[in-house]
Structure formats: structure tokens, C-alpha cells
Image (cartoon, rainbow, N blue to C red):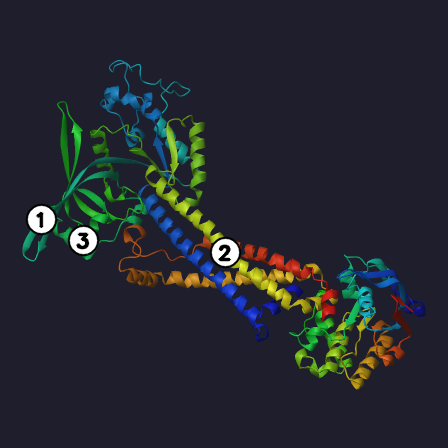
Amino acid sequence: MFELSVAKKYLTPKWRQLSVSIISIISILVISLVVWLIVVFFSVTNGLEKGWVDKLVSLTAPIRVTPTKEYYQSHYYLIDSISEASDYTAKNIQEKLNTVNTDPHDPSTDEAPPLFFAPPLLNEDGTLKDLIKEAYLAIESIKEDLQPKSYEVTGGNMRIKLLRNAGNMPTESVISQATYFGSFDGASPKIQKTLLPLSQADISHLNALSKTRPTERIYLPKIFKDASVLAGDLATLSYYSGTMSGVQEQQVEAYVAGFYDPGLIPIGGKLVLTAPELVSLMRSSQQQEQQIGSNGINVHFESLEKTNDIKEAIEKNLKDAGLNNYFKVETYREYDFTKDILQQLQSDKTLFTLISSIIIIVACSNIVSMLIIMVNDKKTEIGILRSMGTTSFSIAVIFGTCGVVMGLLGGLIGTVAAYFTLKNMDLLMAFLSNLQGHNAFNPAFYGETLPNEISFEALVFVLVSTALISLVAGIVPAIKASCLRPSAILKAE
Amino acid sequence: MNKKVQKRQVLQAKKIHKSFYHPTKISILDELDLNVTSGEVVAIKGRSGEGKSTLLQILGTLDSPCKGELRILDEPVTFFNKSKIRNHHLGFIFQSFHLLDDYTALENVLMPAKIAREATSKNSPAFKRALALLEQMGLLDRAHFSTKLLSGGEKQRVSIARALCNDPDIIFADEPSGNLDKETASIIHDLLISFAKKQNKSLIVVTHDESLVALADTQYLLQNKALV
């Protein structure tokens, strides 16, 4: 193409046009620097966010369906508490799912439902509508290979005994703290991703206690590993259970089976994972059945990009089944315990996007000055080309192309530099840490290494915006060039 | 039949008026008429500052008249078709050659073809044509020379070859030998005139050089804003 061939000639640095060449090189380098900064920043933050979200959804799920206040006030939920067949005890979601007897109430032996019970929700045949089974059906009917699984969370205390042999002197210390207990789903492949590998010391310690260790297992957040807890250490889990005469402390012996990385969950440092049956026992003993969010359905699936679509589909199915008042559907971005930090991260990214857009505009404004100098420098050539029949539009395209090519070249150099920076992120971290005298990035938040994968979104953003801004920057000089009158130029020569 | 075609009007300028307004209004051309037929060699002479170059640029569509009508090959010249007319039907030769410095002689000759979006790769018709033109100008061995390395006479010959690249109907020459010594100027004149005659091209030349004026079919003197 004629315009490209001329633009290429103009962009090739020449000794004869040293000032233009130097300004061009500086403009390209400034753009490269900005692109490098943006790509590195967004790649690291996107990587961190992805890592945090991965851990979050591994411990929880991309979508959670939780019963609402209406559910806990429904006839369906409350009826167990007055039915002999249910041992006069309310059922959790898993129990409701497993039971074959949707309506355990026997009017001949059980007392009549009190007036504060909501009227029963009935099927067309007059039987009691099974809210939990229908909710599962609403989830499973979506063709996305969804895996709903109930979860429970409760509170209690944990006391870990650290027995060590320092030389020949046995020592004993204790860690005791209030703790959240959550269900550990060992069968989930996702949760395996958050489990940390056991060290040699962990394995030795675990083997040493193999004959005496209790049956219950607990998985601790990695902060305990840093506090010298080893796999195999014994722990006492305690919770309070109401009796006829008062409140009694119940204790369960367990051992530390491993550690996991809680990511960005704010309660992550206090969330202990253990067997679902034990969590269920603790929760029901402490009469926390109606505590919103302590029991729900985790909906697992592979592709996080589909989260919003799947949420909408579940909500639609629940609505069609008449259950939308009884269940709330939330994505991982809406969970109470992560919403704030993810929103803050998103706000930071938006702010940096705005700042980086302004920096790109400033960097690309160099192109305007450079192209105006170039237009003045090439005035005679413009006149000659016009005399041979080149249109004003072609002249504008030539200088517009110069602007875009410079922007893209800067973008390309910046991208390559960002790629190498990300590949050597460990070296950069070590350098910054040495410079500051302490860890530049706290491993508790950022992990042992920063993400080093180039972010595709960042790359697209920066290259498209650079090309667009360069094009806009090239418009003024291009118009100036196209408006030059060949007669005036050639006469002046 | 051929004779009829040869004598068709290629350029018609009617009542051309041109004034400059800065710093004060000066009228350069007024009610100027000119008709040029194909194959005709027209020489325009006049004193310096009389407006010869301005007239040539108006006739060559590089400048616009304030009033008047210009038709090239019976087509009225407008803002929209100027570039196309220049590229397809006109060729320019300037006193200071106006070659593109960053290109070789051959690339300069090929430039009008490139602008016309013709293929200019090796063995393409345009490429062969450009080489043939350089050969006719005696510059085949200089084809790949940077124009910076050529002498004045060689540069002007490259400029003539470039003007002829797209086989134009009218060639405009503004003091084509103004920067050359007498001997080289004579060679350039012969080349220009013989080429125009041989190819049946119209040539409009603005010059002070009486020897070139003498070779023209029609001679005009630009005086008092009109051709006489």
C-alpha cells in the first residue's frame, strides 16, 4: 500500500533528521514505559485476584444458595420440631435432602402446628412441597454440570497441645482460641488445591502419633503452620450444648491432619475445617439452626466466567418453582465475608485504569509534537506527492499511520519488557525486599511468589487504548499535513 | 481520423482570474484564456514576477483560480477530481527538480504509478515502463542510485521520466533548465520537445530561455495579467 510504504520511509530514523528521530525514539520509549507499568500492574493484580478467587471458591463455591428468613419460618422447616418422627428436632439441609418423609407430622400423635407457623406450601396433589429437594432439582436441571453440596459453619473453641522434644527436654505449650468450624469435603478436587503439602517434619510427627491419634481430623489455616503447629498435633474442640438444667461444655478430641491456604477470606485465620457430621452436631447442639448463612448449598462448577449466567438460571428456576422467597442466590463476589475486599480490589483497578489512561494520553501527546515537527520537515515532499496526484486523504493517512505505528511499537516494546519483568518477578521481589530491608510483599496476603502470567485483558486494554489514543494524536498533524497547499509549498521552494 | 484525435483540445482555460490578498491585494491574472491541443508545445515567457509560475500551477491544478473555468480533457476541474486528474493526465517538471530525496531514481520514477495503486514490483508493467523511461533518458545505469548522488542534469532527466511515468496527456514544465548549464539545458530541451512530439503529448513550458521558446509550436508572452 502506497501510504504504508511512505509512512515506513518517514519512520525510519535518519542522521539527516536527527531531531525528529530523537523525539520519535523518546516518544516510543515513554509509551513503552507506560505500557510496561500497566501490563505488569494489571497482570499482578489480576493474577492475585484470580488466585484469591480460586482459593475462595475452592473453600466455598462460585455460587451459594442459602435459606432465607422465610424458609426458617416456613411450615416445611418448623414442622420437624413438633413431630415425633423427626425426634422433635429441626433438620439441616442435608438431613432434609436425605429424608424420605417430607411431612413427618402425624396429627394423631403430634400436637397441632401452632398459629405462628406459616401456612404449609402444598403441591397440586395436596402433599407438602419439599423445598430443599425442589431447590436441588432447580439447580441440577441447569445443563452446566452443576454439583450442589450442602455446607455448615458453626463456632466453638479449639485448644491445640504442642508436645515437642527440644534435645532431651520434652516441652508442652498450648494454643487456644475461639474458632469457626466449617465442613471439609475431602472428595472435592477443588479443595485439594488449597491444601498445602506436608513437610518432612509434619510427616514424621504424624507417623509418631499414628497409634494414639483420635478419629476426628482437622485442617488448619496456614497461619497455624507458621505458629509451629505440626500435622499430628492433638487438639480439643469444644462447644456448648443446652441441657435441661443449663449449658454444658462438650469436647471432641481431634488431630491436625493438614493445613490449607485460606486466601483472602477475612475469617480465614480462624476457620478450621473438619468432618461435616461433626460441624452439623456442633451447630445443632448450639441451636444455631436458624442463623442465616450457617447452612446452605454450595454450587460447584468449572467455568467461573459463567457465574452470573448460572446465578440467573438458578434464580429463574427457583422462581418458576415458587421458591424464590425461600432461598437467596449469591455469587462469590457477593458473599458477606468477601464482598468488601473484592469490591475494594475492583475499585483500585478501576482507579488505576483511569490513572493509566491519563498516563497513556500524556505519553501519546508526545506523538502530536513529533508528528507536527515531521509534517514541517516533510513539507516539500508533501508538495511533491500532491503534485503527482496524492490526495489530501492519503497524506492524512500517511501521518495518521505514523502515529499509530509509533503507539503500537511503544506498546510492543512495553509488552515484551513486561513479559520479561513478569518472568523474573522473583528477582524483582528479592531486589525490592533487599532495598526495603523487609518483605516487599507480605506472603500472608500475596503468597510466596507474585503471579507472573501476563494478563490477556491488560494486554488487550493497553494495546487497543494505545493504538486509539495514538490515532487520535495523529489526527491533528494529519489534518495539518493534508491541508497544506502544494502550490504554496512548491513555490516557496 | 487519427489527425482529428491528435488535434483534440486537452486544456481549456476561460477567463482565469487570480489575485493575492496578503499583505495587500494584488491581481496577477485577469480574464486569461488559453486553449491547448494535444501534441502542442506551448511556451509561456514573461518577466519575473509577472505570474508565469502561478499560471502554470493553476493550469496544472496545483492552485485554484479566484474566478474562471478550467477544463482538462473536457472535464471541469473541481476540488474533488483534482488529485485524480493530476495523477492520470498531468506530469510536472520543476526548476529545482523536486525529487524525493529518500528514494532512488527508479523509485522516484515509479512514484506516480504507486500513487495510482498500480503494482510496482519487479517485472510489473509499471516497473518495466519506468526502466524504459530511464533508459530513454540515458539513466539506466543510475536507476538504483539515490537521487542525492545525481548531478543536476541527471536529476532533471529523472524528473522528466517521472513526469512521463503515468503516460500523461499534458506535461507542465516550470523553468526546466533554470538550474542547469547551457549545454545540459540544451540536452534537456531536446529531450523534452522530442519526447512530447514523438508521444503526441502536450507540453506547456514556462521559461525565460529563448532557445526553448523558439522550439515551441505556440509562444505566449504573459504581460499585464494576460497572454499575448
The answer to whether residue A303 shows anywhere in this view is no
Q: Which mark is residue A172?
A: 1
In the rendered structure, which amino acid carries the disc numbered 2?
Ile
Which chain is home to disc 2? Answer: A
Chain letter of disc 3 in the image: A
Label 1 neighbourhood size at 10 Å, few (<14), some (14-19), many (20+)? Answer: few
Tell which of A207 and A223 is nearer to you: A223
Q: Please, what secondary structure does the residue beneath circle 3 have?
A: helix
Residue hosting label 2: A360
Residue type at mark 3: give it: Asp
The residue under label 3 is A202
Q: What kind of residue is marked 1?
A: Glu
Q: CA distance from mark 3 to mark 1?
A: 17 Å
Determine the image quadrant of residue B172: bottom right
Regarding residue A279, the answer to whether it shows in the image is yes
| Residue A77: quadrant of the picture | top left
